[in-house]
Amino acid sequence: MPTAAQLFVKCLENEGVEYIFGIPGEEILDVINALLDSPIRFITVRHEQAAAFMADMYGRLTGRPGVCLSTLGPGATNLLTGFADANMDHAPIVALAGQGATIRMHKESHQVVDLVNLFAPVSKYSVAILEPEIVPEVVRKAFKVAQAEKPGGSFISFPENIAAMTVADVYRPLKIQDLQPTQPAPHKIEQAAQVVAAARFPIILAGNGVVRGQASPALVHFAEKLGVPVATTFMAKGTMPFSHPLCLGAIGLQAHDLVACGFDRADVVICVGFDMVEYHPYLWHPQGEKKIIHIDHISAEVDAHYIPEVSVIGDIAESLKGIARLVSRHPIRSISVLRAHIIKELSDFSEDDNFPLKPQRILSDTRKVLKNDDILVSDVGAHKMWIARLFPCESPNTCVISNGFAAMGIGLPGAIAAKLVYPQRRVLAVTGDAGFMMNSQEIETALRYNIPLVVMIWNDSCYGLIKWHQDRRFGRSGYVDISNPDFVRYAESFGAKGYRVQKAAELLPVLTQAFADNTVVVVDVPVDYSENMKLTQKLGHLVCPI
């Protein structure tokens, strides 16, 4: 008879799991042993947080739950940050942690903590396997819940004595029943169409749900049919191609940006797949005077600044198609003036030769090197704000930004997972020096599994985003300065390649060479973050051009 651990692995195979990211540990040895006979590929990482970030990124890019694994106690708590990041950003993830035997869980015992209750606040489903016979049900429910809208995290605690128990052959993986998208109600489609038709200046706010629902083509058709401009959240970049004349780019800064000018003027905001964690409504709807149309798979969160006039619940693509059929092209004034200002800002610094490099110049050269379907994975920090504002994208999931939980350290491990999902595409991790050092040990993981990618470090020897906030609020900063290793020699110590950009003209050829090297490459780019406060001052005096 198989063990519960062997049955567990068979259930994972039944779910179509390709990779498990993790670190072996004593209390999870039975599962590790069962995986040795499985086609599932185990990716051994150097820190459990990185394992969770890799599973997080796998879930974002595929729509299928990424899986991570750890031992009990500190191994499990190390998973928590990456797991919470996936859950809040609505990426499907399943985490498994070993646990002490059930005969010692009722008392103070070595490395035993209540993992189910620890993970419960940051998960959709948190459970312990306390009998071998329930393994198939637990696994099936964990994957079903993690993948259902809105996706998120399922956590499973597996006590070591339960994992080692045998179970009768009658217990087998359960049949997977595909999730069927709910069709929108026809009367809600009609109500939404009436509100749109009566609007003077409607605007579309596209969120992460458009990416998850693979509704980008429907969004583009909807905008074109109605003639309505589109702004995206940071996490929905590319759902409306930036080259499209109706695209306003991304919105998400707390300051009043150019894109926000379109919302100032709007009387109707059509929110499509919008998650409130992406950009709180009080920032774009402070007075509560606009009519909101909510188009999503599930009902809206309750918020005083987000009270929908109409909610269209169901498959996003079908909802957009249904409304578009009932509304003729909308007679709005051209957005070309506003769009021209946004494009000008993108191009103004493309030839700037100052050193250290300005963020705008770095992004201009980066866009020249990357193809439209290559993937940029952004870590969290000051660089993220510049990427979100100014890096143009033509398709979804080509610029991946953590913006709900916004956990630092996701850049390098996220890029590793992205390259596993799309081995034929080039992958660039963009990170600050502080974020890079949080999971830089995964350089070794990428090299060990022969996963070529490029890591570009925006180096300012500082917690730059926090300094930006301090300078903006108090006119001074403190406790944010750090020192760094020689990143070139650091990369080389792992067996990777390293380059340091020493003048602005070097960035483009260095990035080109880094991808041609076809290995793990670290590129150290000194950045001039004095542009941060210049941007703050500029936005503080912004006069909308429309």
Image (cartoon, helix red, strand yellow):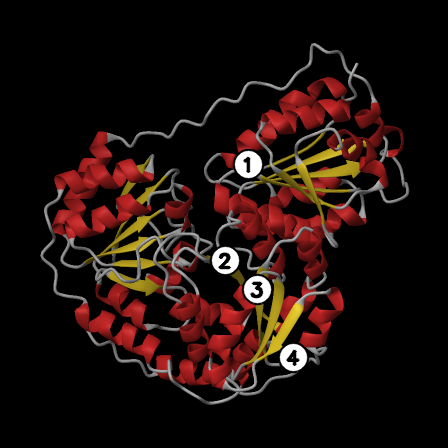
- Viewer-closest of 492 and 432: 492
- Viewer-closest of 351 and 336: 351
Residue in the picture at 69% in, 69% down? 491
Q: Are marks 3 and 4 in contact (CB under 8 Å)?
A: no
Mark 3–mark 4 distance (CA, rounded to whole Å): 26 Å
Tell me the tag on residue 480. 4
Tell me the tag on residue 454. 3
Q: Amino acid at mark 2?
A: Arg
Mark 3–mark 1 distance (CA, rounded to whole Å): 31 Å
Q: Are marks 3 and 2 in contact (CB under 8 Å)?
A: yes
Q: Position of residue 499 (x, y in %)?
A: 61, 76
What residue did someone put label 1 on?
Answer: 146
Which sits earlier in the primary sequence, circle 1 or circle 2?
Answer: 1
Q: Position of residue 291 (x, y in %)?
A: 24, 52
Tell me the tag on residue 491. none
What residue did someone put label 2 on?
Answer: 426
